[in-house]
Image (cartoon, grey):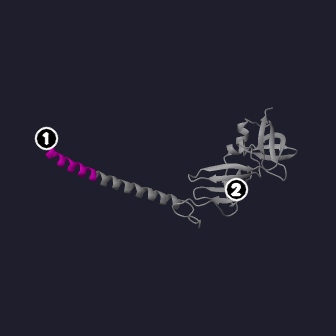
Amino acid sequence: MFGFFKKKKPLKTAVNHSTSSRRSDGLEKRMAAIEAAVAEIKEAIMAGSDESDDDYDRGQTAPVKQTDGHVMSNGSERVIEGVFDGQNMIGSDGQQYDIPANYASKSKLVEGDILKLTINNLGAFLYKQIKPIERSRMVGDLEQDEHSLQYYVVAEGKKWRLLTASVTYFKGEPGDEVVFFIPRDGGSRWAAVENIVKK
C-alpha cells in the first residue's frame, strides 16, 4: 500500500510542477500585457498635454512655468489670470472665457475684478476671485427692456446692466429697489446686485 503512494508521488510532483510552470508563464504574459497597456495609456496622456513646452519630459510632470502674461502650465493643468468685464473673463492671453452667471452673481463680481481660471486635466473650468476692485455701493431702480428682456439698474441719471441670474435669484421685478456695486474709480457698463428690495 505504501509502495503505491511512492509510485504516484513522483508523478504527482511532475504534474504539479508542470501546472505551476504553465500558470507562471500565463501570469507573466498577463503582467507583460498589463504593463504594455499602462505604458500606452501614459504615452497617450503625455501626448495630450502641452508638447510645445521645452521643459516637458516624458514620464515626469513638467514643472510649473511662467509663459506669456499670467498663463501658467504644469503639464496637467493650465492657470490663466484675467479681468472680469461684467459678463466674461478676458484672459491675459487675449481670449474671452465664459463665466457661469450663477458664480458671477453669488460672488458679486464687479467689472474690473481680477480672476484666476484653472483648467484641469479633465477640462473643468474653476474660477477664483483673487483681487477685487475697489467698490462703491449704490441704490437704484430696477428696469427691464421690453424687447431684449435685459435688466438694468438706474441711479443718479445713469444706467447699468445687470446679470439676469442676479435679478431672478432675488425674484426682482421692474420697479423694485436694487442695492448694487460698481467700481469706485472709472466708468462701467455693468453692476453687481447685492440685494433687491421689493416695492
Residue drawn at (15%, 42%), measured in percent from left and top? Answer: 5
Q: Secondary structure at mark 1?
A: helix
- Picture coordinates of residue 47, whole percent (x, y): 51, 61
Residue 76 found in image quarter:
bottom right
Q: Badge 2 is on which residue?
A: 81
Q: Position of residue 186 (x, y in %)?
A: 84, 53
Q: Residues within 10 Å of mark 2 (few under 14, many from 20)?
A: many
The one nearer the camera, 55 or 68, is 55
Against 196, residue 72 (above or below) is below
Of the numbered discs in the image, which one, if any, rests on residue 78?
none
Q: Does the stretch in magenta take in 2? A: yes
Image location (x, y in percent) of residue 157: 87, 46
- Secondary structure, mark 2, is strand
For the C terminus, the image quarter is top right
Q: Which residues are magenta?
A: 1-21
Q: Tell me the residue at 13%/41% (across/down).
A: 2
Foreground residue, 42 or 135? 42
For image coordinates 78% across by 36% down, the residue present is 196
Relative to 171, 134 lies left or right: right
**Residue at the extreme bottom:** 54
Q: Which residue is mark 1?
A: 2
- Mark 1 surroundings: few (<14), some (14-19) or many (≥20) residues within 10 A: few
Q: Nearer the viewer, residue 9 or 170?
A: 9
Furthest toward the top, the residue is 199
- Kind of residue indicated by mark 2: Glu
Tell me which residue sits at (35%, 53%) in the image: 30
189 in magenta: no
Taken as a whole, is the magenta stretch helix, strand or loop? helix
